[in-house]
Image (cartoon, rainbow, N blue to C red):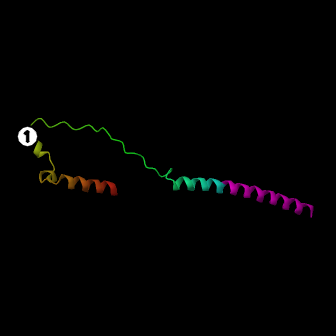
């Protein structure tokens, strides 16, 4: 009987400790909800301008050998399509 009484007291103490912790967590949750509704946590970062170097203009002429090095798609003006297809194939791999 004594052991049961001790176990009962221990359980009561544990339940009280858990109730206290639950109350603390509820208080924190209320604070977080208020912060979210005020937009404090959902504010977006401002976009920053990026300094991207511009390529220099081509100062020369293309030769016939340069054209021979181009792929069939590039000769037809479809290089973007060819690159996109290659990208999709690599992505699937």
Viewport quadrant of the C terminus = bottom left
The answer to whether 69 is drawn above or below residue 21 in the figure is: above
* Magenta span includes 58: no
* Magenta span includes 16: yes
Q: Which residue is mark 1?
A: 63
Q: Residue furthest right?
A: 1
Name the spot of residue 17 as percent of width and height, x first.
76, 55
Q: Is residue 78 left or right of residue 17?
A: left
Name the spot of residue 88 as percent of width and height, x first.
29, 56
Q: Using the image as rendered, state which of residue 68 and residue 15 is in the foreground.
A: 15
Q: Residue at x 19, y 36 (%)?
A: 56
Q: Is residue 63 left or right of residue 12?
A: left
Query: Residue 27 is drawn in which quadrant?
Result: bottom right
Within 10 Å of the Cα at label 1, are there few (<14), some (14-19), or many (20+) other Cα atoms?
A: few
Q: Most prominent secondary structure in the magenta stretch? A: helix
Q: Using the image as rendered, state which of residue 77 and residue 19 is in the foreground.
A: 19
Q: Secondary structure at mark 1?
A: loop
Viewport quadrant of the N terminus = bottom right
Q: Residue at x 28, y 39 (%)?
A: 52
Q: Is residue 46 left or right of residue 72?
A: right
Q: How many marks?
A: 1
Q: Residue furthest left?
A: 64
Name the spot of residue 4 as percent of width and height, x first.
88, 63
Residues rendered magenta in the picture:
1-24
Name the spot of residue 5 as percent of width and height, x first.
89, 62
């Amino acid at each position: 009987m004594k052991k049961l009484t001790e176990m009962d007291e221990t359980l009561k103490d544990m339940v009280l400790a858990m109730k206290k912790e639950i109350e603390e967590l509820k208080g924190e949750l209320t604070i977080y909800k208020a912060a979210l509704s005020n937009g404090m946590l959902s504010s977006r970062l401002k976009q920053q301008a990026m300094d991207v170097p511009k390529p220099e203009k081509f100062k020369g002429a293309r030769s016939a050998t340069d054209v021979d090095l181009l792929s069939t798609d590039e000769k037809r003006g479809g290089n973007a399509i060819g690159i996109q297809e290659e990208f999709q194939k690599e992505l699937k791999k």
